[in-house]
Image (spheres, helix red, strand yellow):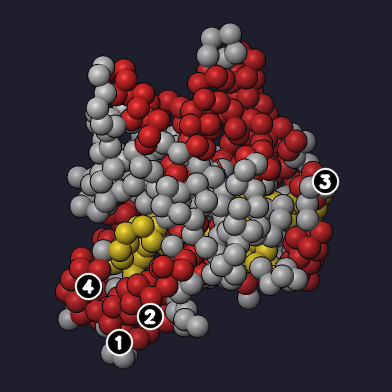
């Protein structure tokens, strides 16, 4: 069993001189090497680069601790985030051996804060999925039980943290891809407000929904990561010019008087009995700590999966048009005409789920169907934003399950896309409304698999979510 260390614990080892970034990083790389054949969390490990950067930090580490919040911390990043010189695949064949010439803003900020990027983690191809089974390079496995999925699409980033390879990682969340794998792997995952974190350098899936966010073993590390990656970026016009508060400082654990909204629509049909029991017990615990439970309503909940899969696939079909065999790595061989080259490259390069979504997205955007599907979905999206505005008049945070079931077996849903999509019922609404949400562990099923609770807050109120999560963690 691996010892899991938090950022604070690693920093204590540095401060006392008991360890160095070189040693901690080498230990992380050794564990990854030992485990990766079984867990498949990493698609690429940058041993040489990580060791070199870590060793270079050894001498100055005590000084760095005073001003670099992630000094000497090994970090893993999802393989849809660009880092200069490191192969980026999005777990797809179509990118071939694409090596980006630039670094995503969130990744650059990690590096400036002293983090050491050790590798790129596995995901559902182009972040489309909820189990990491859609990776062209094989599924990741849940460290709690390797017969089960770790969730997705940021499955590799969740496994890397849950298995103790790295204390923290980055994922991306378009409809739950940080929160659901965090829930399935028994760790913390946060989807920031749309615009809180720059998307520059994140390979786009659905641009109006995508956000980068942290996964960690505890709330403090999550807060610290968010602190580092947040803020306005002139390279992303949708990043928000809104002041970034002190997230670590907000962690008081005091939730007296906090109004927790519980939407009945999220506790009805389709919710696993064990998940309901654990989530309700967690809410009760917060009540015992001084929070007040109030009933709220999210009346459009039954439409959210349909709305999400119209809007997300529409945007995806447009974003993926750029993969044509000309601009990026992979190109099918021996085509006689240009259009045949496009067709064969995309046929051989994309996996089944990505193709399904391109077809769905193209269909809902096509003339004659645009009004019936895409435009209607946009209208319902506006209503969802309104639902949250109404709910947040009555409460400070909303609590729901993160996923309707505990982790499922590898292969259990992979032939049934609709069953997979329905698993996103509690997470996609948050991206459609652009609000922030966090998943934190709230129990374990009778099969010894983790269950998570989700807290949702108003725009830019991540500090409030983190503190509610912190109170529960304590
Ligand atoms: N499971 C959802 C989907 O398949 C969410 C994915 C994500 O957040 N990237 O689209």
Residue at figure coordinates x 63%, y 24% from the top left:
377
Q: Mark 2 points at which residue?
A: 10
Residue at figure coordinates x 18%, y 71% from the top left:
52
The answer to whether the residues at label 3 and label 2 have Cβ atoms under 8 Å apart is: no
Element at label 3: loop
Camera sees residue 397: no
Q: Disc 3 vs disc 2: which is toward the camera?
A: 3
Earlier-in-chain disc, 1 versus 4: 1
* Quadrant of image for the C terminus: bottom right
Q: How many marks?
A: 4
User: Along the line of sight, which residue is nearer the eye, 388 or 280?
Assistant: 280
Q: Name the residue under label 3.
A: 269
Q: Position of residue 430 (x, y in %)?
A: 60, 43
User: Along the line of sight, which residue is nearer the eye, 177 or 264?
Assistant: 177
The answer to whether the residues at label 1 and label 2 have Cβ atoms under 8 Å apart is: yes
Q: Distance between the residues labelled 1 and 3?
A: 52 Å
Q: Position of residue 249 (x, y in %)?
A: 49, 67
| Image vertical order of residue 260 relative to residue 289, above or below | above
Q: Distance between the residues labelled 4 and 3?
A: 51 Å
Q: Relative to 469, is 73 on the left or the right?
A: left
Beta carbon of the mark 2 residue lies under 8 A of ligand 1: no
The quadrant in which residue 409 appears is bottom right
Element at label 4: helix
Earlier-in-chain disc, 4 versus 2: 2
Q: Name the residue under label 1.
A: 19
The quadrant in which residue 472 appears is bottom right
Earlier-in-chain disc, 4 versus 3: 4
Q: Distance between the residues labelled 4 and 2?
A: 17 Å
Q: How far apart are marks 3 and 2 (CA)?
A: 44 Å
Element at label 1: loop
């Amino acid at each position: 069993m691996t010892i899991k260390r938090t950022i604070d614990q690693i920093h204590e080892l540095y401060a006392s001189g008991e360890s160095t970034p070189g040693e901690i990083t080498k230990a992380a790389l050794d564990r990854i090497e030992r485990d990766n054949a079984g867990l498949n969390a990493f698609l690429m490990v940058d041993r040489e680069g990580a060791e070199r950067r870590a060793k270079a930090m050894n001498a100055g580490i005590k000084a760095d601790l005073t001003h670099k919040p992630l000094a000497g911390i090994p970090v893993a990043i999802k393989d849809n985030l660009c880092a200069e010189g490191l192969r980026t695949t999005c777990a797809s064949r179509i990118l071939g051996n694409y090596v980006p010439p630039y670094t995503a803003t969130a990744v650059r900020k990690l590096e400036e804060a002293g983090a050491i990027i050790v590798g790129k983690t596995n995901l559902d191809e182009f972040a489309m999925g909820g189990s990491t089974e859609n990776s062209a390079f094989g599924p990741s496995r849940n460290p709690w039980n390797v017969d089960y999925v770790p969730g997705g699409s940021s499955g590799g980033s969740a496994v890397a943290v849950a298995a103790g390879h790295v204390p923290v990682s980055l994922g991306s969340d378009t409809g739950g891809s940080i929160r659901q794998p965090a829930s399935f792997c028994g760790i913390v995952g946060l989807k920031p407000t749309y615009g809180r974190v720059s998307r520059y350098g994140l390979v786009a899936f659905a641009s109006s929904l995508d956000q980068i966010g942290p996964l960690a073993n505890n709330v403090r590390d999550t807060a610290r990561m968010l602190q580092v990656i947040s803020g306005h970026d002139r390279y992303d016009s949708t990043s928000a010019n809104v002041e970034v508060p002190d997230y670590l400082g907000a962690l008081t654990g005091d939730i007296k008087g906090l109004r927790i909204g519980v939407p009945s629509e999220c506790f009805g049909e389709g919710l696993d009995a064990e998940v309901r029991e654990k989530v309700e017990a967690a809410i009760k615990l917060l009540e015992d700590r001084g929070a007040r439970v109030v009933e709220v309503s999210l009346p459009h909940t039954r439409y959210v999966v349909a709305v999400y899969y119209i809007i997300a696939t529409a945007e995806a079909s447009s974003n993926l048009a750029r993969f044509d065999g000309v601009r990026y790595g992979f190109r099918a061989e021996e085509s006689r005409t240009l259009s045949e080259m496009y067709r064969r490259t995309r046929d051989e390069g994309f996996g089944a789920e990505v193709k399904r979504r391109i077809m769905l997205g193209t269909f809902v955007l096509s003339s004659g169907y645009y009004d019936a599907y895409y435009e209607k979905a946009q209208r319902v999206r506006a209503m969802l934003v309104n639902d949250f505005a109404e709910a947040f008049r009555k409460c400070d945070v909303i609590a729901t399950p993160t996923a309707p079931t505990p982790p499922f077996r590898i292969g259990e849903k992979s032939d049934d896309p609709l069953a997979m999509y329905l698993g996103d019922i509690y997470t996609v609404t948050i991206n459609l409304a652009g609000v922030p949400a966090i998943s934190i562990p709230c129990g374990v099923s009778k099969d010894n698999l983790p269950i998570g609770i989700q807290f949702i807050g108003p725009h830019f109120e991540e500090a409030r979510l983190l503190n509610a999560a912190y109170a529960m963690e304590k």
